[in-house]
């Protein structure tokens, strides 16, 4: 997969969607020449299913801190973003099995789907519970 230089000591590349849980070897090539073979990395699935949210409603102009309880208490530190409707926001804090995000202002009053992301907002696991 293509990569990008972040700085003089870091390279970033996306993980292919077909990667399955388990060990995967990483090799680094520069102009088709291998320059590094690193130790195997371990990939695992993160359970981002919800057990509850609190509160379930907030102010139309935003600013309500919403606590999202996850079914897997070991997943919260992996969550980077929440999404309210179509508006992603960063996680502001997390604790045992809980992440907290600040609700953005609503375009119109009403209920919106709520989700969380563990890949910097690239994709979201959506909750069956809505935020209003």
Image (spheres, rainbow, N blue to C red):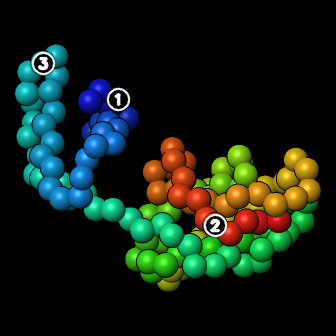
Residue 24 image offset from top left, x and y in percent: 15, 50
Q: Residue 33 is drawn in which quadrant?
A: top left
Please state which of the two labelled residues, at mark 2 or mark 3, is closer to the viewer: 2
Residue 26 image offset from top left, x and y in percent: 15, 42
Residue 128 numbered mark, or none: 2
Nearest to N terminus: mark 2 or mark 3: 3
Label 1: few (<14), some or many (≥20) within 10 Å? few
Q: Where is mark 3, residue-wise?
A: 32
Quadrant holding the C terminus? bottom right
Q: Secondary structure at mark 2?
A: strand
Please state which of the two labelled residues, at mark 2 or mark 1, is closer to the viewer: 2
Q: Secondary structure at mark 3?
A: loop
Work out whether residue 61 can be spotted.
no
Q: Residue at x 73, y 52 (%)?
A: 85
Residue 28 numbered mark, or none: none
Nearest to N terminus: mark 2 or mark 1: 1
Work out whether residue 79 can be spotted.
yes
Q: Residue at x 31, y 30 (%)?
A: 3
Residue 82 image offset from top left, x and y in percent: 62, 58
Q: Is residue 13 above or below residue 93?
A: above
Q: Residue 50 is drawn in which quadrant?
A: bottom right
Q: Is residue 32 above or below residue 6?
A: above
Q: Where is mark 1, residue-wise?
A: 4
Q: Residue at x 48, y 66 (%)?
A: 48
């Amino acid at each position: 997969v293509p990569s990008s230089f972040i700085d003089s000591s870091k390279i970033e590349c996306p993980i292919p969607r077909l990667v399955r849980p388990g060990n995967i070897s990483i090799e680094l090539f520069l102009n088709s020449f291998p320059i590094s073979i690193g130790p195997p990395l371990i990939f695992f699935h993160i359970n981002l299913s919800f057990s509850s949210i609190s509160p379930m409603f907030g102010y139309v102009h935003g600013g309500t801190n919403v606590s999202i309880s996850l079914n897997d208490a070991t997943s919260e530190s992996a969550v980077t973003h929440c999404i309210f409707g179509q508006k992603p926001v960063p996680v502001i804090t997390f604790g045992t099995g809980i992440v907290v995000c600040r609700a953005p202002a609503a375009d119109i009053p009403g209920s919106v789907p709520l989700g969380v992301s563990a890949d910097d907002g690239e994709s979201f696991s959506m909750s069956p519970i809505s935020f209003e």
